[in-house]
Amino acid sequence: MRKSKLRFWGFLAPSLIAFCIVVIIPTCIGFFYSLTNWNGIVGSDVKFVGFQNFIDIFTRDDSFVHAFLFTALFSVCAVVLVNLVGFGLALLVTQKFRGATLLRGIFFMPNMIGGLLLGFTWQFIFISIFEAFSKKTGIAAFSGWLSNTETGFIGLLILTVWQMSGYMMIVYIAQIQQIPESVKEAARIDGANSWQLMRYIILPLMMPAFTIGLFLSISSSFKMFDQNLALTQGGPYKSTEMIALNIYNSAFGANEFGFAQAKAIVFLIIVAGIGITQLVITKRKEVEM
Amino acid sequence: MKAKKLVAVGMTVLMLGGLFVGCGNSADTSTEANSGENVKITIFQSKIEANEGYKKLIAAYEKNHPNVEINLEAVTGNDFGASMKAKMQSDPPTIFSVGGFSDMKDYGDVIEDVSDLDIMQHALEGTTDTFTKDGKVYAVPLYMEGYGFVINKQMFEDAGVSVDSMMNFEGMKTGFDTLKKKIDNGEMKDKYPNLEAVMEYPTKELWIAGDHDANVALTHDFKTPNEAYAADSLPGTGLEDYKKMVDFQASYTTNANNTANLNSVDYTTSLEGGLAIERVACIKQGNWVAPAVETTDPEVLQKLDMLPYSVPGYSDGKYFVGVSGYWAIHSKATDAQKAVAKDFINWMFSDPEAQKIVVNDCKFIPPYDNFDGIKASDPLSQRIMDANNSGNTMNGWVYSGAPNTWSQQVAGVEVQKYLAGEADWDEVTKTCIEQWSKLRKQQNN
């Protein structure tokens, strides 16, 4: 008994210690700082202010609430589009035709480029190329991109879908290839048309992949930072500022680390809540083969 | 067990002792250095563009002072704050770059009083304000920068407008209107095929719509950054002039009828994609644009000139100028090091050979009055130097005394809203004044 307990802790210890050092302890320190007015400079005076920072988040100005609503709306649109496009691409490239493998590579490519670089690239496309196009053709819709909230929002959406769909495609390809030919063949022999095959065979068997795909896209679009920073910098007039950027600005722009830390904790709770809810719901829909 | 503990404690004491002995020893050697032997100092600086110039200065100085060794280290502006915090803890430099009020607050304990430097007698008025405390000066001003309306002189002359006629607001407006008319009816097309508009106004950059344009508003209420820094509230008497200059600039751009679009124009579009390729004839900027224009098209640089930042009836004919870089001396350095550091700084701003390097290689506009007869390396810097000599300047860095983030995140953001039609100027005024007090109160806590 004694020996097995020792073995249990012995094997657990390395990862437990690592987990403590990189996750548990920083979280606790972070929570401590959220109760202070620390300005981020080592050695400066740190005053304990209780829950004042948490109250300030909602009373000082509406920037956090605005950033949250903007992020939420963005995430809903992005999650739907990214997964639809990703699934569509996966279906496309699992068909048997010449160049399918090449297309997989091409669709996945945007995912290999860093968010900052993509942000600047698309900024150039939206501002310079769209503007030039609008001048040549006279279509006003292509003029003044990223200068107002709507085009800023759509711009972020296009960038995100373009970048993340390829990744989701890979996830879905893996699952599509797991579906045995025999099941599909049996359905066809039973007289299922291709819509029925999709609806009653492929989609239910795809559920585990949707669980992962939704989780990844929800969490990454909520936490999106570098694309936001590079493409719009939250502008114009902070209207496209997402939560992560809002926290960053509080911490490094205004040097209010304590306040930023409090925002980060609220953010953590919200994202964790949404993520777990989604996992529970989609897990229920998964079917065993 | 007990014995082991004792040994451990003993070892620790020994090691700590060793540390102290080590310090003592090094102090000894430097006292020896005092008596004429080698002295080594380190400069830790943030103006990477001037690094080559500094190297030349150091080489010249070391030639005359064989027992001195100067180490130069540079980190770019964005990473400088964090690097310096680390550097201070591991290997404190003798001379280091400092910027504004926050540095004065953070490093106040470790910077040396430099009031007694000979060169300080030549410092232009107001250039030492930020680092003055109780009548003593704690940092040496290094270089000045100034801004106004940077114009393509050639274009205006081709349109029949002389530069001298535009030295006040009325003249500038007349000149701009003349050029605008000629652009609109196609008269400039032959000579300048790229030319689209008189101005570009990149309000995507919060520092352009915020810091610099807001500065005009602030100078109505505060003469120096120190006054602004001490103010709990903003009277806001200059905000009408702020509006005037925002409207003025916006009205000469291609987006004059749809000012919301200005919020997506960035600095690069206005400079490398604007002024430097002769797409526009003017942008409101400072002498710091010269290197970028030179890289894009050296010929255009020679056509440039700078008009004053004339606000009608307020700052007609004045350039907004200020010091944007300082050097401080570490007060915990040895006496020998401090002496060398002070001598080096005195030398670089007073020796005729060194002065030339400062202006031509570091490309500085020196904040001192003993640089007569030395020409700047580009026409924009020359304008600022002349303005300094004739006194046609106002303080361009008053915004640095505003509450942290106010000038960009409040004033700049509000101007973006105003241009997009999301707020009228009364709301802008109200928010600017309210947020000043609010931020000040938070930051003084």
Image: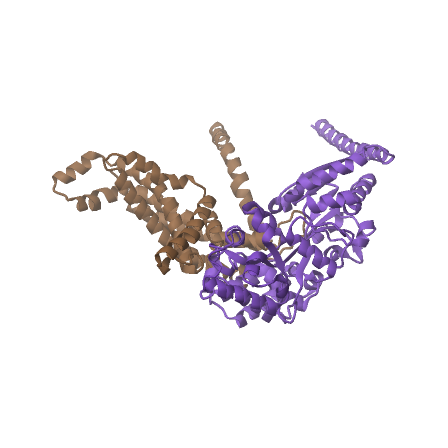
The number of callouts visible is 0
Q: Is residue A271 visible?
A: yes
The answer to whether residue A223 is left or right of residue B399 is left
Q: Is residue B289 visible?
A: no
Quadrant position of residue B137: bottom right
Q: Is B30 or B412 nearer to us in this picture?
A: B412
Percent x, y for residue A93? 27, 38
Rendered colour, chain B: purple
Q: Is B420 or B167 nearer to us in this picture?
A: B167
Reply above or below: B102 against A6.
below
Quarter of the image where the C terminus of chain A is located = top left
Reply above or below: B383 against B94.
below
Instruction: Tell me what residue is drawn at x 69 percent, y 41 percent.
Output: B53
Quadrant position of residue B170: bottom right
Q: Is A196 or B63 nearer to us in this picture?
A: B63
Q: Is B374 or B246 nearer to us in this picture?
A: B374
Percent x, y for residue A7? 48, 28
Q: Which chain comes out brown in the rendered image? A: A
Colour scheme of the picture = by chain
Reply above or below: B290 against A106.
below
Percent x, y for residue A148? 44, 60
Residue pushed farthest right?
A: B35
Percent x, y for residue B183? 48, 62
